[in-house]
Amino acid sequence: MSTAAAVAHPPAKERLRAIRRRRTLTLGALLAALVTAVVLSIAVGANPVGPAGVWQALTAPTGSESDIVIRSLRVPRTALGVVAGIALGVAGALMQGHTRNPLADPGLLGVTQGAAFAMVASILLLNVTGMSTTILFGLAGALLASVGAFALGTAGGRGGSSPVTLALAGTAVSAFLYALTSALVLLDEQAMNVFRFWQAGSIEGRGEAVVWQVLPFVAAGLVLAFANAPGLNTLSLGEDVARSLGQNIALTRAVGIAAITLLTAAAVAAAGAVAFVGLMVPHMIRPLAGPDNRWLLPYSGLLGAIMMLVADVVGRVVALPGELEVGVVLALLGAPFFVALVRRRKPVRL
Amino acid sequence: MNVKTTPRITADRPLRVRGASWLVRPRGLLMAVTGTVALLTLMALNMRMGDIPMTLAEVVAATIGDTAHSFVVMELRLPRALTGALVGAALAVSGAITQAIARNPLASPDVLGVTQGASVTVVAVIVFTGATYGGASGTLALVGLPAIALLGGFAGAVVVYALAWRRGLSGHRLVLVGIGISAVFTNLKYWLLTVGDVNDSSRAMVWISGSLHARGWEHVWPVLSALAVLVPAALLGTRTLNALRFGDDTVTGLGMRMNRARGVLLLIAVLLAAVATASAGPVAFVALAAPQIALRLVRTAQPPLIVSAFVGAVLTVAADLLARSLFSPTELPVGVVTAVLGAPYLIYLLIRIRRERRT
């Protein structure tokens, strides 16, 4: 659309330049915010450390108490937050793009619960131990749930399904899987004790090993997601137009689902059931990044990481001496956002 | 797919009592009779189960006359079965009203904040008054929990209703806001579960899954009285409910005070769901599935209230039977079974609606 306008009106070139400038500025702002969030996440907590102390602990550790806290607890926690945040942000943007539904979110659509159920079942029924095997089960569960959510969300012909239908479908899928999970958990009190912390969504105390275990999945998911971006741009013109432009629609969808599955399963394995990041981030960044998915996806990832870290820091501060899990903080932030989105006079269309 | 039969003119006769009149549908009556028989059979089957196994004949004898089993049957097993039936009926009527108001067959009190609101408050009470904090037990636990659940359920519905209100009420907005708010309640619930000690959390977990375990007469009476008052009130509003299926403009054009009518009916629905949840915890999907099944049985335009109630009762008691026998001797909460069975039904409905819209 914009290229045709650029040919017709020379000033459009000017506008294009303005858009580019805005994108660069946004990227700079996002990176700066991410660095700040990382520093905050390492510095803030029950044992606060100044920026100088953080620098020293990272570059030249002396083995003091705060050095140990930072290197063994806060750095892994922060890294996990960044990885999970990026994964959820990109997954949310992809999902909204593919379903053309402004309310799409891996948490709300049941993908999270799918991964959760498969992982709990593998631990309890098959006695699977070790994160790397569990995560494979999580992947399978997430795949099934996201295919299900997709089938319900996109089969409505052109323009996608109505947000109400998709949201209800997500609720149904979630409730179903949650009931299965809770049946398993209720039969085993030990599992209950692990499960309840996991279900609240938390990046605390997972350790460095988890970061390394989920990283390959997130990396693979990101590669697929960015490869999917141009195709998704074409798809957003409608399936008929995309097809007539020579796009392989089935392939584009399949790559999209694969990316969503990898990212969500990895995030769930890392941080438990965290909802609303994928919902909020794309909406917040779209005014700045524009509708082009090649920009929207990476920006959503960055903002997702920022949001995850900030929510985690807030959770550490508000409920001293205890902590509020990051999933709870995000729900408290995300739900008003969701309600505002629904109450808007002009419904958001994708 | 299904072959469309030509519409027949059914022998619906109006029943007139002074100014008021209702349509009496033979099919509906037939369903009600079948429903009663099925319900009684299922309840009797349910009452056979327990530490002392009984035959059906023994159960019936103990209910009617005075036998050795009478205490067990009358004081322990009958109230449980009755609570199940009544809770199911209340949820189903609540769902039927909600679906008519939201003009969406997929709406239910589950998404209106009632169930989740009740769950959060109950979990909070169990966790904060549980073993770790000194503990409240005995009468307080017995009377307090349902009362608090009722309060929480009502508060949840008020929040959703207030947030969905915007110069009037739109069914879609109500459902979406409900889903959003329910998600917050759910997360709060999970957080509360992490705060308490593991025994309290387990107890809370059983409650929030919807359980009929150890329900006595004190659980039967509140639901029964709520049904006795609210169902006749809802029946008086049937005409309004039937009108509500048209668009907002048409309803207003028919001379109806739409928002007020909706408000009153919604209040009835919320009260029924809240009372039911207070007695048995959130028994998921009964409110959604029962009215839709009733609709297909009776073939009316709107979910019929009375038949829905029967279907809801049958579903809940049947689910409880399943929950008790599946992993026997371990009992699952009934809500787990209704959710596992109900969610696929919701998905089936979604697909069906999609298909109907496309053709």
Image (cartoon, rainbow, N blue to C red):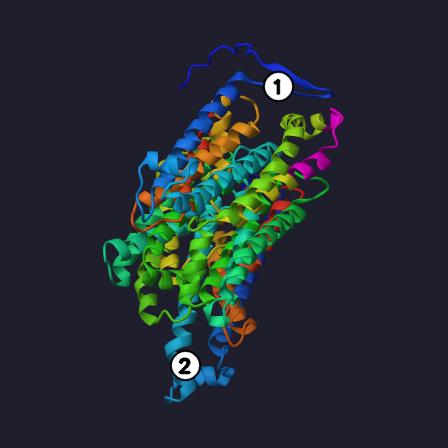
Q: What residue type is labelled 1?
A: Leu
Q: Position of residue A337 (x, y in %)?
A: 59, 54
Q: Position of residue A286 (x, y in %)?
A: 56, 51
Q: Mark 2 points at which residue?
A: A69
Residue B258 in magenta? yes
Q: Position of residue B60 (x, y in %)?
A: 38, 35
Q: Is the magenta stretch mostly helix, strand or loop?
A: helix
Q: Name the residue under label 1.
A: B23
Q: Which amino acid does label 2 sit on?
A: Val
Snapshot quadrant of residue A230: top left
Mark 2 is surrounded, within 10 Å at the Cα level, by few (under 14), some (14 to 19) or many (20 or more) other residues, namely some
Range shown magenta: B252-266
Identify the chain of the residue marked 2, using the numbered disc in the image: A
Question: Is residue B117 something one can see in this rendering?
Answer: yes
Q: State the residue at coordinates (34%, 49%).
A: B331
Camera-near label (2 vs 1) is: 1
Rendered view: A270 above or below A41 = above
